[in-house]
Image: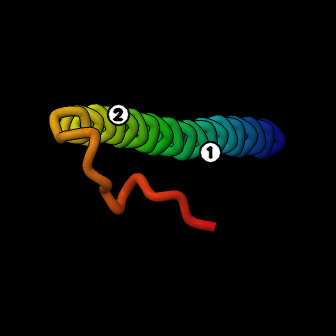
């Protein structure tokens, strides 16, 4: 009877150890997924900001080209100084 209890105790310790290891792996995996999700979101936002900045530069160049193609002796309301 004593030997059977030792075997059951060892089996219980082994089962709890395996459960602890699996729970730890699950927690690590979920933390890693949260980190990867944040990294993907940061990359997406950085890429969007880069495209927006590039579009703004192209728009500014377009506006400057349009203004320089106009007659500079005429008064344009966009160029007036306002206080």
Farthest residue, direction bottom: 83
Whether residue 78 is visible, yes or no, is yes
Visual colour scheme: rainbow
The tag on residue 43 is none
Residue plotted at (83% across, 42% down):
2
Residue plotted at (74% across, 36% down):
10
Residue plotted at (26% across, 42% down):
63
The tag on residue 27 is 1
Tell whether 33 sits left or right of 9: left
Residue in front for this viewpoint, 57 or 5: 57
Residue plotted at (79% across, 38% down):
6
Q: In this view, does 71 lie above or below 77?
A: above
Query: Callout 1 environment at 10 Å: few (<14), some (14 to 19), or many (20+)?
Result: few
Q: In which quarter of the image is residue 82?
A: bottom right
Report helix, strand or loop for mark 2.
helix
Residue 62 locus on image (x, y percent): 22, 37
> Pointer 2: what residue?
57
Is there a contact, CB below 8 Å, between mark 1 and mark 2?
no
Q: Is residue 83 above or below residue 72?
A: below
Is label 1 or label 2 in front?
A: 2
Residue in front for this viewpoint, 28 or 61: 61
Disc 1 from disc 2: Cα separation: 45 Å
Tell whether 61 sits left or right of 34: left
Residue in front for this viewpoint, 73 or 30: 73
Report helix, strand or loop for mark 1.
helix
Residue 56 locus on image (x, y percent): 34, 41
Residue in front for this viewpoint, 44 or 8: 44
Query: Callout 2 environment at 10 Å: few (<14), some (14 to 19), or many (20+)?
Result: few
User: Along the polypeptide, which appears first: circle 1 or circle 2?
Assistant: 1
| Marker count (numbered) | 2
Residue 15 locus on image (x, y percent): 64, 42
């Amino acid at each position: 009877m004593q030997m059977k209890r030792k075997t059951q105790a060892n089996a219980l310790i082994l089962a709890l150890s395996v459960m602890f290891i699996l729970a730890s792996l699950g927690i690590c995996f979920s933390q890693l997924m949260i980190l990867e999700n944040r990294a993907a979101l940061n990359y997406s936002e950085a890429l969007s900001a880069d495209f927006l900045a590039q579009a703004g530069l192209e728009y500014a160049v377009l506006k400057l080209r349009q203004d320089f193609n106009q007659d500079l002796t005429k008064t344009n309301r966009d160029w007036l100084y306002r206080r």
